[in-house]
Image (tube, coloured by chain):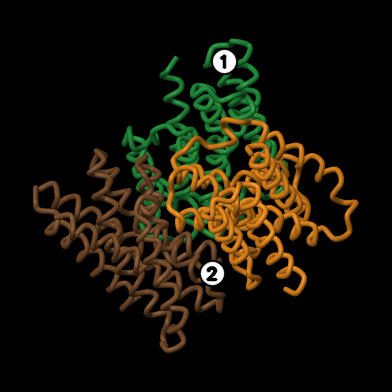
Chain colours: A green, B brown, C orange
Amino acid sequence: MPSFIDFLDVLGVAVFAVSGALVASRKEMDLVSFGLLASLTGIGGGTLRDLLLDQPVFWIEQPYYLVTCLIVAILVYFTAHVFQRRFIILLWADAIGVAAFSVMGAEVALRSGANELVAIVMGMMTATFGGLARDVVCAEPVLIMRKELYATCAMAGATVYVGVAALEASFIISALAGFTVAFALRAGGIHWG
Amino acid sequence: MPSFIDFLDVLGVAVFAVSGALVASRKEMDLVSFGLLASLTGIGGGTLRDLLLDQPVFWIEQPYYLVTCLIVAILVYFTAHVFQRRFIILLWADAIGVAAFSVMGAEVALRSGANELVAIVMGMMTATFGGLARDVVCAEPVLIMRKELYATCAMAGATVYVGVAALEASFIISALAGFTVAFALRAGGIHWG
Amino acid sequence: MPSFIDFLDVLGVAVFAVSGALVASRKEMDLVSFGLLASLTGIGGGTLRDLLLDQPVFWIEQPYYLVTCLIVAILVYFTAHVFQRRFIILLWADAIGVAAFSVMGAEVALRSGANELVAIVMGMMTATFGGLARDVVCAEPVLIMRKELYATCAMAGATVYVGVAALEASFIISALAGFTVAFALRAGGIHWG
């Protein structure tokens, strides 16, 4: 079911782009820096995944991913001041992104012939690298390194996805299982963190 | 006109290497660290560009880029104490590098068949990644994230280059247009910043 | 003598994984973050090397490298509190890793047809990138940038290895020469640093 794959991928890019643009907003940057941070965060994880698996970088082949990041940057630039609690929105956008990319990273790795352990690690990396790059570039405390089960969520999502897929479940079932577990764990982390 | 392409590329590498070596000088590092920072800053942006476009990394094929960085590192090591205002020189070297690499990044991307938007983003990345890596490694405040129109200059240079090239202008005309716009904007940013 | 090559590679990955896990321990992270930091540090340098040389990333082809990092992470997680002076162990693990990877980075580059200067730079990068990524992600002061002859050791090890190999010495002789020089220099740096 390729359309659900594409949906997860675009969803992950878009929500991570939101989180990047919100960091730009917290730091009162200009519009171009919004675009840069939204793109870095949105496409960073998938870029690392594609480089490591030695396949064409996804956003170079399909420029609509970049267009998504830029539209998100513009929308957030003109609306961010409306929202009272931007850091909370950032955390939730980030949570959706982690859940979507932990599944997508593992899926792309499996499809390229990697073994299960490598697929799980690739899921973790895809899910966490964009946010990590965002935080390092902005000299924010790195979200992934706070004691909030952050990396654990990505690992759990990728592991569940790989495990359910190994049972020959359809992509949509495996993906929903992985996404749900990662998101639920992260939501708990945010709520009680 | 390949010779002008090569000139821009070597110019960008050399001036970014100067900026990297000057950071090493500000931090009173040893000679090897001068070489490392000069190389990281000089070849970082082009390396990222080549990895993303899946083409051979330029300095592995042509080692004279590395030699350039190392010569720059040695020259700066033995002369930096002569100059009173090293941070100003660093800023101007960086400005020339950003202008040269915003054009070269976009050019290499176009040549590899990328579309215009991707070429502009590649110009921005090539122009800014070396300096970003330099600042992250040295734990300096990241230059690109200060409110100084830094990323904007790179984007403007790449956009003008791609736009003028789309009008079927020769490389030297398009490149000079892109370079001039990026450098003029950055010069304004330094002067009034 | 391929078995000694493999030994050096696994040794480098394992001791860098120890250093990554020890940083996780100093920061009182959870088990998954131990695994993440051990892997990032253990395989980071070799990953950069393989990406730059455009060859398959070693741990994707051979998952036992990842397994090594994860076992190390678990062992350190459950035993680190036993050791009184974790930072000293971290420094020595890092020193062995730098020595092993300065040789392996140069060797892999030479084997792929790179020239001598590129091979030396690749040795330095392979030896230093894992630790650099570890320190940047954890917002530790970057070890490589302290005035401790850190990068110098990696350069010396790679240079000696390339030099002795150029005299048509066997791999084991060249590798031991490079390893010993790098390790001795670094040991001096730690002892008198």
Question: Quadrant of the rendered structure where residue B147 is?
Answer: bottom left
Q: Quadrant of the N terminus of chain A?
A: top left
The residue carrying pointer 2 sits among few (fewer than 14), some (14 to 19) or many (20 or more) residues within 10 Å by Cα, namely: many
Q: CA distance from mark 2 to mark 1?
A: 52 Å
Residue C117 locus on image (x, y percent): 45, 58
Residue beneath label 2, please?
Answer: B33
Q: Secondary structure at mark 1?
A: helix
Q: Which amino acid, by three-letter code, is at mark 1?
A: Ile
**Kind of residue sitting beneath label 2:** Ser
Name the one closer to the observer, B186 or A51. A51
In the foreground, B47 or A179: B47
Question: Which secondary structure, mark 2?
Answer: helix
Q: Is residue A113 above or below residue A88?
A: above
Does mark 1 fall on the same chain as mark 2?
Answer: no
| Chain letter belonging to callout 2 | B
Give left or right: position of B26 versus C149.
Answer: left
Residue identifier under label 1: A173
